[in-house]
């Protein structure tokens, strides 16, 4: 085959391929431009973007004359419009703390017991029933809350029973130093000092006792006895009456009051 023949065959082949390509392009549908793929610039004709390309920027989807998916213009947001704010969150509720149950102190329990016993003492209608309540009150008084002070008080009472007044008073001196709020310690030392004829010391201790426990019927009776020995019958009568107001069923105190009443106030006419 000559060189010219080969050139003719190649030219025919290329022409055939071109014709097939053109026919294929004529048969395929041409995609319509998608709305929103048109770039519109003022002063220029609309520019068709390639299929699949999206237009953004100052003249794109948010620019003037931009069309949305359905072909309608997309308005630009007004400058005055503000984005909606999320609703405020409710303040977080903290779990409420429940305070622990408070337990009354030993001192509060002691005061509560004494109040009830004194109410029963005043309401007692016989000497026997009243004495039982009075004994219960004295048992409460006899406890200081301190093991050391209670032990020393026990030794002081042993010395008092043995009429060793010096040892008893020395022990009670120590007790009132370590437990100054214990009314019964002052009352017991007043008793020892009274037995030692130290009336001034006894009166001072009775005053300390009544400051801490104004209902101490033993201290009130002791005060009456000291005043009576000092020939202060009127004041002694007042002290005995105060003792009876707290503890009405005291036969011995009643007799003393009846006697002093005649001496101080005379007989009724």
Image: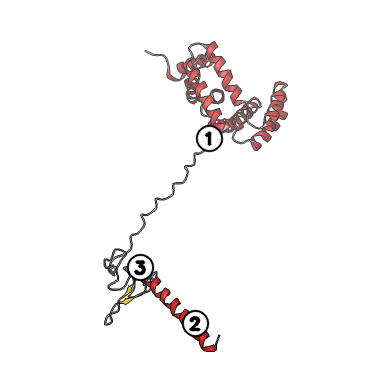
Which residue is tagged 3?
Answer: 29
Which sits in the foreground, 150 or 113? Answer: 113
In the image, is residue 33 above or below residue 245? below
Q: Which sits earlier in the primary sequence, circle 3 or circle 1?
A: 3
Q: CA distance from mark 2 to mark 3?
A: 33 Å
Q: Nearer the viewer, mark 2 or mark 3?
A: 2
> What residue is shown at x 70% (from left), y 29% (from top)?
151
Which residue is tagged 1?
Answer: 102
Total numbered labels: 3
| Res 9 label | 2
Can you tell which quarter of the image residue 173 is in?
Answer: top right
Q: CA distance from mark 1 to mark 2?
A: 114 Å
| Residue 35 percent coordinates (x, y) | 31, 68
Tag 2–tag 3 contact (CB < 8 Å): no
Can you tell which quarter of the image residue 41 is in?
Answer: bottom left
Tag 1–tag 2 contact (CB < 8 Å): no
> What residue is shown at x 34% (from left), y 73% (from top)?
60
> What residue is shown at x 53% (from left), y 37% (from top)?
100
Which sits in the foreground, 93 or 43? Answer: 43
């Amino acid at each position: 085959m000559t060189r010219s023949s080969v050139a003719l065959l190649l030219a025919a082949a290329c022409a055939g391929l071109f014709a097939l390509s053109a026919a294929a392009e004529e048969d395929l549908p041409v995609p319509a431009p998608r709305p929103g793929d048109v770039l519109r610039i003022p002063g220029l004709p609309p520019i068709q973007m390639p299929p699949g390309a999206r237009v953004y920027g100052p003249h794109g989807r948010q620019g003037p004359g931009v069309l949305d998916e359905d072909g309608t213009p997309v308005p630009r947001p007004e400058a005055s419009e503000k984005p909606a704010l999320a609703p405020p969150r409710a303040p977080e509720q903290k779990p409420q703390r429940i305070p622990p149950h408070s337990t009354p102190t030993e001192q509060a329990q002691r005061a509560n017991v004494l109040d009830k016993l004194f109410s029963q003492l005043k309401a007692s209608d016989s000497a026997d029933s009243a004495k039982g309540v009075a004994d219960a009150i004295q048992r409460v008084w006899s406890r200081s809350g301190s093991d050391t002070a209670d032990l020393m008080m026990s030794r002081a009472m042993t010395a008092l029973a043995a009429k060793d007044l010096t040892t008893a008073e020395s022990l009670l001196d120590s007790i009132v130093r370590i437990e100054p709020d214990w009314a019964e310690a002052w009352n017991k030392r007043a008793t020892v000092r009274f037995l030692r004829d130290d009336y001034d010391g006894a009166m001072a201790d009775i005053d300390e006792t009544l400051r801490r426990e104004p209902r101490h019927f033993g201290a009130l009776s002791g005060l009456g006895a000291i005043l009576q020995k000092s020939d202060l019958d009127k004041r002694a009568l007042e002290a005995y009456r105060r003792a009876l107001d707290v503890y009405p069923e005291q036969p011995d105190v009643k007799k003393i009051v009846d006697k002093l009443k005649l001496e101080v106030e005379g007989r009724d006419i």
